[in-house]
Every structure is written in C-alpha cells, then in structure tokens.
Image (cartoon, grey):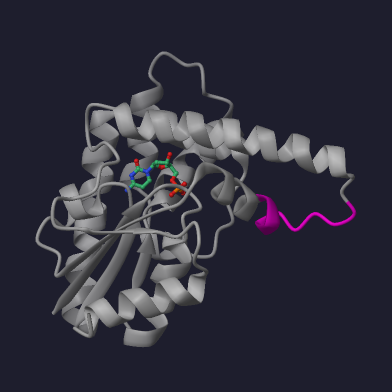
Amino acid sequence: MIEIAIDGTAASGKGTLGKKLSNKYNFPYLDTGILYRKIASYIIKENINNTSDLEKQCCDFAQNLILEELKNENLRTEIVAKLAAKIATFPDLRKILNNKQKEFNKINKKKYGGCILDGRDIGTIILPNADFKFFITASLEVRAKRRLLEKNISFLHENDEKCMLLNLINNMRERDKLDSIRKISPLVPAKDAYIIDTSLINAQELFFKVSNIIEGKK
Ligand code: DC
C-alpha cells in the first residue's frame, strides 16, 4: 500500500500534481487545504469571524465535516484563503482535521492500495511514514501569475492586471509567512522529501519528474 505526501506553497503546482497522480495510479486524492477553506468560508458566511470563541466555532463545524462531500467545492477566493491561513494556526482545530485526514488515508489506502494527500504538513505530521514525499515550490511571482490565470479574467487593462498581480503577491507573501512561522505544523519540507522548484517547469514536466521518482527511474 502506497502513501504519497505532497506539501508546498500555494499555487506551486501541488494540487494539479496530486490530481494527475491520482488519475495515473487510481489512488484517491485529497487536497487538505480545502478543509481549512471550507471552515473559513463557513465562518465568513455566518459572520462569526470576530467572536471570542472563534476556535470553538471552527472546531464544532469541523467535527461534522464529511471530506468526500468537499471535493468539488470551489473555495478559492482571497478572503477565504486569508482566513484559512489564520484558523490553520488553531491547535484544537488542527487535531480534529488531522484525525480526519489520517482516517481518509487509512480507509482509502486499504480500499485502493494507495492514497495521495496534499497540504502543508502531510509529510511531517499527517503521513510521517509516507513512501514518497514531495515538497513543491516556485517563486512568488510565478505563483501569483498562476493564480491570476486561474481567475480567468479576460479583457483586463494592463494597469489593472499589474495591480491584481501585486495584490496577489502581497497576499501570498503574507500567507507563506503565516504558514511557515506558526508553532504547530509549520510549512517546512520533511527531511526525506524531494524538493522540487516549479518556477521553470510546467505541470506536465513536474508530473513526469515525480512519476519517474515513484517508478524508480531516477
Ligand atoms: O492549500 P491551500 O492554499 O488551499 O490552503 C489554505 C490554507 O490552509 C493555507 O494557508 C494553509 C492551510 N493548510 C494547512 O495549514 N495545512 C494543510 N495540510 C493544508 C492547508
């Protein structure tokens, strides 16, 4: 049974890689960032961001999350991302979500012979004994450009595009910092992870590189 752990920065290409590997090997794939985003989106919808028991509200909601139902949700707005990074620092919330991720891995690994998870602490905390660990990153500018392209906004004036790009760069820099300096489960590569910079390679090249490593061709 194979466990594949993918960690890395936002928009580094780890999600696309996870999906491609999932298609190739028929192993279920979980983007664990969606758990934090789903809770953040709930907090925004219910307008309870400034309550004194924010962590408790997050935990109560998290207890009832069903991971399989989250897969097709689109929660990629900047507001949600910002709050997701904040609540991801809550220790009790992480405990609940960690258990859910481990359970997802256990069940699916048994059922399908393998499982793929992507996030920030998969290789270090969730699947410390994963068979393959990858840490994917890219320059801030490249990642911000990818996010802008994903937004699929056409006919953008050149100045507006520059402005949006700068905004994205600033937001991502802030989130990278929050993810990296937090005390629990910070964004750091596992000691035994393959670290891959995708600034100069595309999604397909990354996929080939990682497939070759998995199949022992490297
Ligand atoms: O991967 P993403 O951008 O969708 O993640 C959203 C936030 O959730 C990100 O700021 C870090 C946090 N996160 C985390 O702390 N641990 C994970 N395993 C996945 C995401």
> Does residue 203 appear left or right of residue 22 in this picture?
right
Q: Is residue 1 above or below residue 145?
A: below
For the residue pair 75 and 128, the one nearer the viewer reads as: 128
Q: Is residue 1 visible?
A: yes
x then y, percent, for residue 186: 26, 36
x then y, percent, for residue 45: 60, 35
Q: Is residue 142 above or below residue 91?
A: below
> Does residue 119 appear left or right of residue 128 in this picture?
right
The residue sitting at 34% across, 36% down in the picture is: 60
Q: Is residue 87 visible?
A: no
The residue sitting at 46% across, 75% down in the picture is: 205
Q: Is residue 126 above or below residue 27?
A: above
Quarter containing the N terminus:
bottom left
Number of marks present in the image shown: 0
Toward the front, the furthest residue is: 200
Rendered image quadrant of residue 21? bottom left
Tell me the quadrant of ligand 1.
top left
For the residue pair 212 and 183, the one nearer the viewer reads as: 212
Rendered image quadrant of residue 23? bottom left
Toward the top, the furthest residue is: 52
x then y, percent, for residue 52: 41, 13
Give the prevailing secondary structure in the magenta stretch: loop
For the residue pair 68 and 86, the one nearer the viewer reads as: 86
Q: Which residues are magenta?
A: 148-155
The residue sitting at 46% across, 37% down in the picture is: 84
x then y, percent, for residue 180: 32, 33
